Amino acid sequence: MTSYPHLLAPLDLGFTSLKNRVLMGSMHTGLEEHSNGFERMAAYYGERASGEVGLIVTGGVAPNRSGWVGPFSAKLTNRKEMQEHRMITSAVHERGGKIAMQILHAGRYGYHPLAVAPSRIKSPISPFSPWPLPGFAVEKTIQDYVDCAALAQEAGYDGVEIMGSEGYLINQFIVELTNKRKDKWGGSFENRIRFPVEIVKRTREKVGKEFILIYRLSMLDLVNDGSNWEEIVGLGKAIEDAGATIINTGIGWHEARVPTIATSVPRAAFTFVTKKMKSELSIPLICTNRINTPEVAEKVLAEGHADMVSMARPLLADADFVKKAREGRSEEINTCIACNQACLDHVFKRKIASCLVNPRACHETEINVQESKSSKKIAVIGAGPAGLSFACTAAQRGHKVSLFDKAKEIGGQFNMAKIIPGKEEFHETLRYYDKQLKLHDVDLRLGREVAGQEITDGKYDDVVIATGVKPRALSIPGIDHEKVLSYIQVLHGAPVGKEVAIIGAGGIGFDVAEFLVHEGESPSTDLSLFLKEWGLDPKLEVRGGINHGIKPEVAPPARKVHLLQRTKGKIGAKLGKTTGWIHRASLKHKQVNMIDGVSYNKVDDEGLHYTRDGKSHVLKVDHVIICAGQLPERSLADDLRDRNLNIHLIGGAYEARELDAKYAIDQGTRLGVSI
Ligand code: FAD
Ligand code: NAP
Ligand code: SF4
């Protein structure tokens, strides 16, 4: 008897069967456009097939040039391009998997001057005004979808997914906001949905009955004047009649100002939307967004929210997610913490995607954990993300690793991150590492502050210093005043007054502000609070699911917070590309006062004195909290200098300036595979 009977049950599609209910959702990786990208994608998708995922969907591929997401991004329009895809389909099929290719036309989201759309209406997230498609070009575009699907079939794919959500071209036809046409492709609802329905109908005619055709239906647009529920159901039915095999769920256009996948979104927050659709349609439905553990996936399936679950980022984080669940080893799953730092943030910067908790993702041909030819004795000082990733990787290769930390628990700074409201997922990374240390017999010594003299010559073949960072000391007059606290004191429980100023608006400044304004249950763990905070309609009755009289409801802040930075300009400009706006919006909901372009004068009994635009100000606060960045903690490394030891510095101990957990884990892993 398996623990996940619904998740691991096969899905019979009539002409074929999927081995379980997990769909690896489409994710652009950047490999699509890379010089040896197809070899790398073959390795990447191949590993996910070995990990037993039921059906993989590739990143989006354009059916023509105007459908590119960016200049020269992936397209499939001829047989030469088709041949390359065979590398991917063979790799997946050899490992017993199934794979569908996503066909994505970006429409007005195309970040290039050839972008087209139903009407000439610029999107708020692209500088390019799209060219309106003349009627003959609409027909041609439909044919391009059909031809693209036929080429995908020839390349050996088991199916295609027609991307009809997230605000891309198809969505732009469906919604009046972006479709002002007067011809048969615009105006009435029937006219506006003609484009997707014709694509599905004609694709089905071309590819025959025995080919999986998934349609990604925007079930919640989250933009003003998006579709209403009646229209979405009507479209779903028309798509079913047109010949789709499965309907996948899309939540939120890219331009929507509601978080849909960030770590502060509760797990499985949007599966209720798919559940509502279940009673309307008869083909299998897939639910999606923030499903990241087998337990959550099993629960939504058992409760009848959908027939399958889509997980994209969780399969970047762990290729063996399904296999581990099937083998009763879910504790060993490296869980996606929904940070977006190495996946989406990379893609938006046109870098190759990876994963903060799994640097091997999309780098399978480059980072390989192979048994070491000789077993070394290695001491690792510091059990933060850098030390943990190194220790687990090196031990997995057969080295004898002793891991020391002066703290009583593993995790380093992650132990502060995990208590920030909205960052509860960070617990999972520590659970994962705890399990890996045990599995690979790492000799863990907690509560041990290591001093130079303990590391004697000859005791260890290599010494890895992963001692992290220390807060930057400031020299503002009054810095020793009793009102001044470090972020570490605050996050370790120091009492904090009702009005505070935070010096430094980087990642930690924002997190400390979030910590200080919240009281009680966090919206990230309570769906009804989350829906209220972002003004969403839980009944799905209003157009687009948002606004139209629904006012966001936010619990009052626990205290008044002022967040300051010296740099002139947007506060927190260096926060993650895809998450920074959420952090800023969330603090605005709590009326945090953000002040840029300041110079700090002093702290005294009155509060924090600063100058801005030549004028002096005083914030009469109870406490001033310092979040002004970090410096490397190298006292141990300095102690060991000039000794005859093989010393390696990683993580914050090596470099504090560009340090985050992504950097620390990547560096630890890379040293682990090469030592
Ligand atoms: P650390 O995590 O600092 O670990 C160093 C370890 O070494 C510590 O456990 C320390 O006890 C130990 N140590 C030091 N000296 C000795 C000694 N002599 N003997 C024994 N042990 C010793 N990063 C992100 O990427 N994304 C985030 O969302 C994010 N959020 C954060 C939120 C907060 C509130 C904080 C504080 C940090 C956050 N970070 C985040 C930063 C991230 O946690 C750090 O970049 C990362 O932990 C650095 O890893 P590290 O292993 O180099 O150092
Ligand atoms: P940080 O992001 O570099 O921010 C440091 C802040 O301190 C800046 O706002 C800086 O702004 C200010 N500062 C720097 N020197 C100062 C000085 N001498 N006096 C006064 N202010 C000064 O560093 P952090 O907040 O400590 O974060 C550490 C790392 O963890 C970062 O890499 C960060 O990305 C990561 N992290 C990420 C997240 C996330 O959500 N992704 C969350 C937490 C932490 P001014 O110079 O303009 O004053
Ligand atoms: Fe998940 Fe973060 Fe990895 Fe992306 S980088 S897959 S969000 S853990």
Image (tube, rainbow, N blue to C red):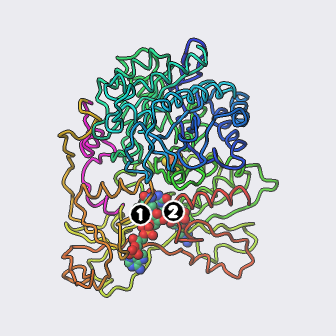
Which residue is drawn at the image coordinates 44% and 17% (left, top)?
Answer: 240
- Farthest bottom residue in view: 477
Q: Quadrant of residue 644?
A: bottom right
Label 1: element kind: helix
Residue 339 percent coordinates (x, y): 46, 51
Side of 587 where 647 appears, left or right:
right
Mark 1 or mark 2: which comes first in sequence?
1
> Which mark, by number, is residue 507?
1
Vertical side of 296 occupied by 535: above or below: below
Left or right: residue 599 versus residue 103 is left
Comparing 644 with 83, the one in front is 83
Q: Is residue 601 above or below residue 426?
A: below
Name the amino acid type tagged 2: Asp
| Ligand 2 located in image quadrant | bottom left
Alpha carbons under labels 1 and 2: distance apart: 9 Å
Q: What residue appears at the point 63 percent right and 44 percent down from the top-left corner?
A: 32
Residue under label 2, please give it: 660
In the rendered structure, does residue 159 fall within the stretch colored magenta? Answer: no
Helix, strand or loop under label 2:
loop
Taking the image as shown, residue 111 lies to the left or right of residue 423, namely right
Residue 540 screen position, x and y as percent: 27, 30
Q: Residue 139 location, x and y as percent?
A: 50, 27
Percent across and percent down for residue 560 are 21, 64
| Residue 359 in sight | yes
Magenta-highlighted residues? 511-540
Please give the name of the residue rendered at 31% of the width and 58% of the height, measured from the top-left corner.
514
Question: How many other residues sit within 10 Å of disc 1, few (<14), some (14-19) or many (≥20)?
Answer: some
Q: Are marks 1 and 2 in contact (CB under 8 Å)?
A: yes
Some atom of ligand 1 lies within 8 Å of the CB belonging to the residue at label 2: yes
